[in-house]
Amino acid sequence: MDADVVIVGAGPVGMLLAAELALAGTHPLVLERLPAPADQPKARGLGVLATEALRRRGLGAALDEEHEKGLAALERDHGTTRTHFAWIHKVDPEAADPGRRGALIAQPALERLLRERLRDHGVEIRYGWTVTGCSEATDGVRLDVDTPAGPRRVDAGYVAGCDGGHSVVRKLSGFDFPGTDPLMTVRYAHAEVGNRSELPPPGRLPGGTLFHEDGLIAAFDFGDTVPDRSGPLSADEVRASVRRVAGVDVELGEFHGGLRFSDGARQAASYRRGRVLLAGDAAHVHSPNGGQGLNLGLMDAMNLGWKLAATIRGDAPAGLLDTYSAERHPAGAAVLHNTRAQSALLAPGPHVDALRDIVGDLLDLPEVNRYVSRLLSGVAQRYELPYPAGHPAAGLHCPPLIIDGSPLERLTTGGETLLLHPGAKDITTPLRVRALTVTTINDNRFGALLLRPDGVVAWAAAPGEEAPHLRSALEAW
Ligand SMILES: Cc1cc2nc3c(=O)[nH]c(=O)nc-3n(C[C@H](O)[C@H](O)[C@H](O)COP(=O)(O)OP(=O)(O)OC[C@H]3O[C@@H](n4cnc5c(N)ncnc54)[C@H](O)[C@@H]3O)c2cc1C
């Protein structure tokens, strides 16, 4: 056996999953087809849940530093620090749950942080290793891999496909991937535009939406939805798309490449088939509108890491690993749902123009703004618990708390299940639970709580109240 878990893909999701598995005492190995890390700019920020998860692992200071730079860049590019729904930049990201916030960090900077974390944990990433075959073997999974030194076979107890939207692991392992075809294709190019004065101002046009600024042009094209995706984006393809969207023949100076993506929305029917698991874009694809993909994938990794590690160590309660798909599939489906709504709101034409005006006005109402902010952040996404919840926060991700005068995140860097209870020393459990006797939790909702390694409130009691089901919660997780 080469590793407990082979993770295919050293994107942000694969790296976070590897870090979580190592933290929980197992041996992951990461295989990445690229010869070296790529600095492709994609996401520019993390949502509330992923930010809080990384803070709970001690990355808060690094995120804060990047956030300041990100705020300045957002203000410069969009004239506001509000986030958007279908490019209506009115959503207050802090309206979802006041006091909780995401972090603006460019995806390459986040990936650097995660690489450093893997180095600290002694986890190896093998670059230039492309997985081409995947089959279940006795007690494990066998992978065929093209490596710089020729073909190799790699054996692992489990395989996690974190290999992005075109996931080879997903295809080779027979996962169903139902969903909807794209309505639009976005082409995003780094190039100087020679005749920018001839372009209409950035915004909605008869064929879609156009954005341009110094060194960048992007066309949201509703007239060409099934492009040949086999090659890299070319200047000719961008010119043709701008012509369809804006009716202008754009002159492109030096072309520095770019990205092509669509709003096709698909999701694996289940995230587990035997010993093969999917996480991140490999499990779900959708348009980047509203900036949710990275957050969603990182939270897959947080949910899967401790469950898979416990299964490998042999101390997982029966069925624990199956709760990964059961909990994360609805979270993914909710994101696909709202990105489809955003695509509908981006379609060209006077009817959608009218609808956008109304949605824009509605977003000025605080309750509506809060509703959309909650949709995009996922903070209201509650996991079903196999016992009566008994407390409004049970099944939700825990907000930041101050525990006996210290931030919660100081207690969670080790990744254990955490029991915070005034009588913790009297509660016995054979499980790997770190039990701490607390006197104060700075939030008047909580007098005691049981926190899973992924930050989910598994059980809680209001101050001064005896809530039942603590024993059931300890046994379930
Ligand atoms: C333009 C753009 C803007 C975006 N903006 C946002 C945003 O603002 N907010 C947000 O949350 N999300 C955003 N996203 C989405 C976000 O970038 C993705 O959701 C995120 O990168 C998914 O991470 P991942 O690790 O699942 O997959 P990826 O980042 O795609 O990583 C997969 C890795 O697997 C490797 N791989 C693939 N096949 C193999 C193989 N056969 N063998 C070995 N390795 C393999 C790849 O080389 C790659 O390194 C944006 C995406 C785009 C394109």
Image (cartoon, helix red, strand yellow):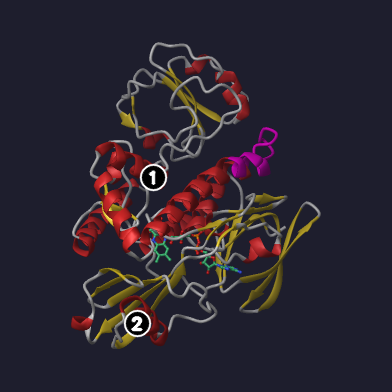
Q: Give the mark count.
A: 2
- Label 1 near ligand 1 (CB < 8 Å): no
Which disc, if any, is residue 377?
A: 1
Residue 43 lies in quadrant: bottom left
Q: Quadrant of the C terminus?
A: top right
- Please tell me whether residue 175 is drawn above or below residue 225 in the rendered image: above
Q: Is residue 334 visible?
A: yes
Circle 2: is it few (<14), some (14-19), or many (20+) Cα within 10 Å? some
Whole-angstrom CA distance, mark 2 to mark 1, is 35 Å
**Mark 2 in CB contact with mark 1 (< 8 angstroms):** no
Residue 127 lies in quadrant: bottom right
Amino acid type at image mark 2: Arg
| Residue 238 vs residue 110, the one in the foreground | 238
Mark 1, secondary structure of its residue: helix
Residue 270 locus on image (x, y percent): 64, 49
Residue occupying image coordinates x 55% and y 19%: 470
Circle 1: is it few (<14), some (14-19), or many (20+) Cα within 10 Å? many
Residue 358 locus on image (x, y percent): 28, 50
Indicate whether residue 332 is drawn in magenta: no
User: Foreground mark, 2 or 1?
Assistant: 2
Q: Sequence order check: which comes first, mark 2 or mark 1? A: 2
Residue 271 locus on image (x, y percent): 62, 50
Residue occupying image coordinates x 44% and y 57%: 114
Residue 329 locus on image (x, y percent): 57, 46
Q: Which residue is mark 2?
A: 243
Q: Is residue 64 visible?
A: no
* Horizontal side, residue 267 vs residue 232: left or right: right
Residue 242 lies in quadrant: bottom left
| Magenta highlight range | 309-326
